[in-house]
Image: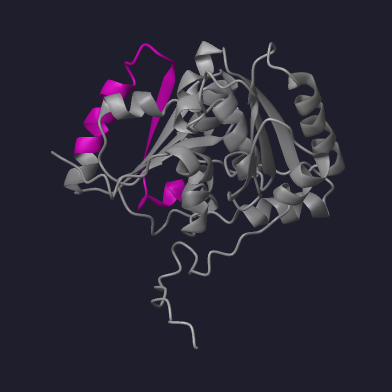
Amino acid sequence: MQTSTKSRWAYGIVGVLVMALVIFNLGFWNKQDSCAQAQTNNQKPVTPIQSLQSQNNPSTATQRLMQALSEGKFACLFFYEQGNADCKTMEKNLDAFARNPKKPVEIIKIDRQDPNNSDIVNTLKVQTAPIPLTLLVDPSSAIVAAFTTVVTSDEMVQALPSPKKTETLKYMQQGKGVILCFASKKMPGCKDIQSCCSQAETKLGGKAEYISIDLNDPKEADFIKELKVDPNTAVPVTFVINSQGQVTGKYDGEVQVTNLVAAATKVVSSGCCAPGSGKTCPPPQPKKK
């Protein structure tokens, strides 16, 4: 069975960064909920998965999820409905994915229509999500991939993220901005640029996190490629993503603390309707002379 690339959720360049927010923008999860609650209680923001830990009577699925994460495993949440042909096909592919040698993965199959699973279904707000819905969760509780159609076991393996990509997605799911600096130690001015990134993080007071990525780290090769960073660049490359998942700054070489702070807190209006709003944008109107 072939699937349309238009209907598949994958996480490519800017999409790689905003993919953590895609399912939430479609209404499955309001990331502001956890941020507002955390601020009220003077606690750190939590990811959607972490919020499940507060359930009084967790379902078997939720218990299996928490157990897998505590054991350092990836968890694959597979939401399905009885009698759906695509769900049956995806289930077979996930069984094959579970046997992959790359990283240990716990497959958790969740019947969305079963009342016993209401805690995880309601908390993640997937009651009306397209199915089959497959969420890949890393041991730190970040949702690192999501698919709303049938994908192969090989595609699931490719969705397993690098450590720095996982860290990026986790912060974004906490409603924070991210400053990514791709560099190698031998680059001229590397220490100064990384110092500026660190200072910007401090000035932002928890609104954004700084992540340093070594261009020579083989574990990050795919992440570097996804963001279209030249691994042979002569200068550090710095990206700034705001809390809405928008890339608001990209700098080749020298950076300024004030610019990083401004970019991390900047909100870019697309002038279009939000994803999942059910509305369409009107065609651009000609300017009046």
Please give the name of the residue rendered at 28% of the width and 45% of the height, measured from the top-left corner.
149
3 lies left or right of 70: left
Toward the bottom, the furthest residue is: 289
Display colour scheme: one colour
- The quadrant of the rendering that contains the N terminus is top left
Vertical order, 100 against 40 (above or below): above
Is-magenta flag for residue 166? no
Q: Nearer the viewer, residue 187 or 102?
A: 187
Toward the front, the furthest residue is: 289
- Identify the image quadrant of residue 150: top left
Q: Nearer the viewer, residue 221 or 98?
A: 221
Q: In this view of the protein, can residue 192 be seen by the observer?
A: yes
**Coordinates of residue 270 in the picture (x, y in percent):** 53, 64
Q: In this view of the protein, can residue 51 be seen by the observer?
A: no
Please give the name of the residue rendered at 48% of the width and 55% of the height, measured from the top-left corner.
28
**Coordinates of residue 201 in the picture (x, y in percent):** 80, 37
**Coordinates of residue 110 in the picture (x, y in percent):** 38, 41
282 lies left or right of 4: right
Toward the left, the furthest residue is: 1
98 lies left or right of 145: left
Please give the name of the residue rendered at 52% of the width and 46% of the height, measured from the top-left corner.
18
Vertical order, 161 against 91 (above or below): above
Please give the name of the residue rendered at 26% of the width and 44% of the height, measured from the top-left corner.
5
Q: How many marks?
A: 0
Q: Which residues are magenta?
A: 89-118
Vertical order, 166 against 207 (above or below): above
**Coordinates of residue 135 in the picture (x, y in percent):** 43, 39
Is-magenta flag for residue 101? yes
